[in-house]
Image (cartoon, helix red, strand yellow):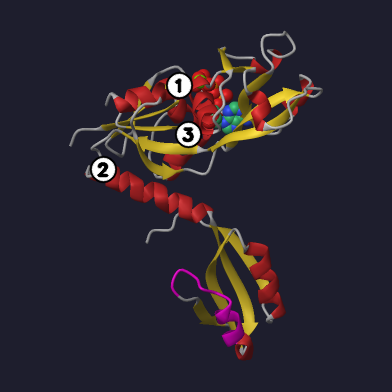
Amino acid sequence: MKNLKIAIQKSGRLNEKSVQLLKNCGLDFENYKSSLITTVNNFNLEILFLRDDDIPGYVAQGIADLGIVGENVIDESQEKVTYLERLGFGRCTLKIGIPKDSDIQQLQDLQGKAIATTYPNILQEFLAEHNLSAEIQQISGSVEIAPGLGLSDAICDIVSTGGTLKSNGLKPFADVRRSEAILIGREGLTENPILCELLQRVRSVLRAKETKYVVLNVEKSNLPQITSLLPGVKSPTVVPLAEEGWVAVHTVIPEDDFWDKINKLKAAGAQGIVVMPIEKIIL
Ligand code: ATP
Ligand code: MG
């Protein structure tokens, strides 16, 4: 069967986590920093290492079948690609920032103002949604210094902690859109068996990341109370302990309400709670 090609970022914020995700899917490959293409030894896949801005275009044109890239970059590119899975890393927000002493107070105050950005298409869409028109100054980097230099009244850029804004005398003003890394595919690919296998692996890795494996000991008389707290993948596994009247309960707990669950389990008589990471969950 013909190999599929997946494009990932060559270096930058998404590179490491993209490589790690593919490795966690059981793919064996050399992550040569110097080569732009590598073949996976145990799966019908080749990996292309590209600038992130080029990934949506490569996928839309079918040069790569798949790609891992930030939603912000997909939207800005305006390329037609299929979203296959949200990957939960590379989270950030595209925001409008204004000088600390700016007289801009509400969105309407942006009307007619100059806004510097590397995301002109997303910004234009945002302005149109709010019936605003502004002068979009497209620049290719170091956006935060634009207001200080008198190029613009505001900026639109990716913000995670706000540190860069602050050190340039700016403050966040409005959220334009949130973003995370997405697995994308070219149109018409969805029936491909290699993709189906890869997607199953990706999903099992993502599911595992959101859950923990928990083993706890409990007196048999408290077991009904404990099991009522545990939905588990099916139902919990209950194993007798050497000590008469005690059992060990094995189960899987979602990360998001983890501490709340653990406290309830303790209150219901759970002891010796051991928590372990899960590598994969295959349904
Ligand atoms: P390339 O050389 O591949 O063009 P880049 O410099 O354009 O890389 P990076 O800074 O490596 O891009 O960011 C890649 C992606 O990571 C962004 O497009 C965005 O989706 C995501 N990201 C997550 N957090 C941040 C952040 N704090 N700042 C910038 N990007 C972030
Ligand atoms: Mg880039």
Q: Position of residue 89 (x, y in %)?
A: 54, 40
Is any part of residue 12 visible from this angle?
no
Q: At 49% from the left edge and 55% from the top edge, which residue is drawn?
A: 208
- Identify residue for label 1: 53
Amino acid type at image mark 3: Glu
**Which corner quadrant holds the C terminus?**
bottom left
Does dot 1 land on a helix, a strand or a loop? Answer: helix
Amino acid type at image mark 1: Asp
Q: At 62% from the left edge and 91% from the top edge, which residue is drawn?
A: 221
Magenta region, residue range: 223-234
Of callouts 2 and 1, which one flags the residue occurring earlier in the amino acid sequence? 1
Does the beta carbon at disc 3 come under 8 Å from ligand 1?
yes
Residues at circles 2 and 1 in contact by the CB criterion of under 8 Å: no
- Identify residue for label 3: 71
Q: Position of residue 202 (x, y in %)?
A: 40, 47
Query: On the picture, is 200 further left or further right than 97?
Result: left
Residues at circles 3 and 2 in contact by the CB criterion of under 8 Å: no
Give the vertical position of 233 relative to 147 (above or below). below
Q: At 71% from the left edge and 14% from the top edge, which residue is drawn?
A: 147
